Image (spheres, helix red, strand yellow):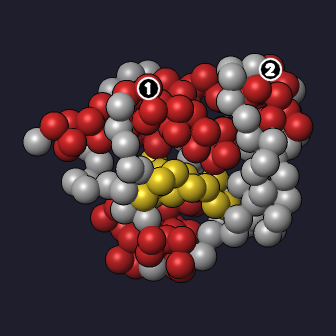
Amino acid sequence: MKKTAPANVWDILVVCTGNMCRSPLAAAALRAKLVTSGINGVVVRSAGTLAPAGHPATPEAVDAAESRGLDISYHRTTPLDKANVRRADLILVMEAPRHIDAVIAIDPDAEAKTFLLSDFSDGPWGGQNIPDPIGISYGFYEVIFDRMSDLLNGVIASLAEHREK
């Protein structure tokens, strides 16, 4: 069942495991979609449940973003911690239950604002985990990027709905 974002979302945290592939790609795509949809004032950040601090995105992730007109070459990994969980109004994760459980273990109050990215879609990927492309072919990065980009349309629609009220 398609879910909706909480009202008054100003800070979105996108979470994956290492913060080197999925979450930086999804965050970049979400930022671009916010601009093109005219939704202003939303900060988009990313973090990883097992991310070491300060590492760059994988070369494949940088290339996949670049091939779609986005730049994540500046990205450096950020570990998921209590401060970035509490700051977020909406937390989008790639895998359930693993990533959701990691967020809730850090801050049990975050449960109501933590969603699987695909929960915003009624399409074929609705409710599905986003596979980790690390260590797989560049083509798989492109597939994952495109899947996340499509799923983010549901997030944008939900945010836009709240902004119109």
| Vertical placement of residue 4 versus 12, above or below | above
> Residue at point 37% right, 28% down?
37
Can you give x and y, in whole percent of width and height, for residue 68 in the image? 68, 20
Question: At 45% from the left edge and 79% from the top edge, which residue is drawn?
Answer: 107
User: In screen coordinates, is 47 left or right of 71?
Assistant: left
SS state under label 1 = helix
Q: Residue furthest left?
A: 165
Front of the two marks 2 and 1 = 1
Q: Check whether the beta carbons of the residues at disc 2 and disc 1 lie within 8 A of each other.
A: no
**In the image, residue 54 above or below residue 66:** below
| Residue 155 visible in the picture | yes
Identify the amino acid type marked 2. Gly
- Count neighbours of disc 1 (C-alpha within 10 A) and say few if under 14, some if 14 to 19, many if 20 or more: few
Q: Is residue 97 visible?
A: no
Q: Quadrant of the N terminus?
A: top left
> Which residue is denoted by mark 2 in the rendering?
139
Percent x, y of residue 127: 42, 38
Q: What residue does disc 1 label?
A: 36
What's the residue at 11%, 42% (across, down)?
165
Residue 95, x across and y down, in percent: 56, 50
Q: Residue at x 69, y 69 (%)?
A: 79
| Residue 9 position by quadrant | bottom left
